[in-house]
Amino acid sequence: MDDSGVNTRAASDELDRRLILLLQANARESTATLARKLGVARTTVVARLARLEASGRIVGYTARLGGSEAGRSVQAFVGITVSPKAGREVVKRLSALPELRQLASVSGEFDYMALLSADTTARLDALLDEIGEIDGVLRTNSSVVLALRVDRQT
């Protein structure tokens, strides 16, 4: 707390949270605009961004496709079961696939859950074959995304 009784750490965490939310909505927003929206100095925003990047809370900035561009891809969730001790090499090989959007280690029936995005069903089919041929992959189970009902990723 500072001399006025305000919890400065909580205020700091809240400012970081609001900054991250603004960046998730529009990562191209200028620091001056972010500062104006947050009610702080531009130098404060620059310093916060540097700290968030250095700490690993912000690891990159990206472009999201919308409208017809986003609808041109075929997406699938793929459950992947691997043999014991093969996980590290399987993750390395999967990471090399440009169509891999997300990879999570999960509990339950599978060891990993991958989200793939391919231009065509033929490319998706080829990707699934490639994944199945990776040494250490024992089994896969795929579910093609038919429609996205809720998307809160920004």
Image (cartoon, rainbow, N blue to C red):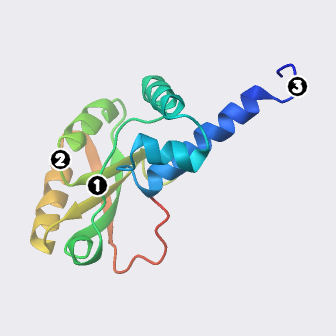
- Where the C terminus falls, by quadrant? bottom left
Compute the Cα span from label 3 to label 2: 54 Å
Q: SS for tag 1?
A: loop
State whether residue 129 is above or below residue 75: above
Callout 3: SS = loop
**Number of numbered discs:** 3
User: Residue at left 52%, top 30%?
Assistant: 48
User: Three-letter amino acid code at disc 1?
Assistant: Ala
Q: Which residue is mark 3?
A: 4
Distance of label 1 from label 2 (alpha carbons): 19 Å
Q: Residue at x 44, y 26 (%)?
A: 50
Residue located 40% across and 76% down the image: 148
Three-letter amino acid code of the residue under disc 3: Ser
Whether pointer 3 and pointer 2 mark residues with C-beta atoms closer than 8 Å, the reply is no
Q: Which residue was labeled with disc 2? A: 97
Q: Which residue is mark 1?
A: 63
Q: Please tell me whether residue 85 is drawn above or below residue 109 in the rendered image.
A: above
Does residue 107 appear in this view? no
Q: Residues within 10 Å of mark 2 (few under 14, many from 20)?
A: few
Residue positioned 27% across, 59% down in the render: 116
C-beta proximity under 8 Å, tags 1 and 2: no
User: On screen, 74 above or below 11?
Assistant: below
Of helix, strand and loop, which one carries label 2? loop
- Asked where in the image residue 87 lies, by quadrant, the reply is top left
N-terminal of the pair, mark 3 or mark 2, is 3
Q: Position of residue 99 (x, y in %)?
A: 20, 55
Q: Residues within 10 Å of mark 1 (few under 14, many from 20)?
A: few
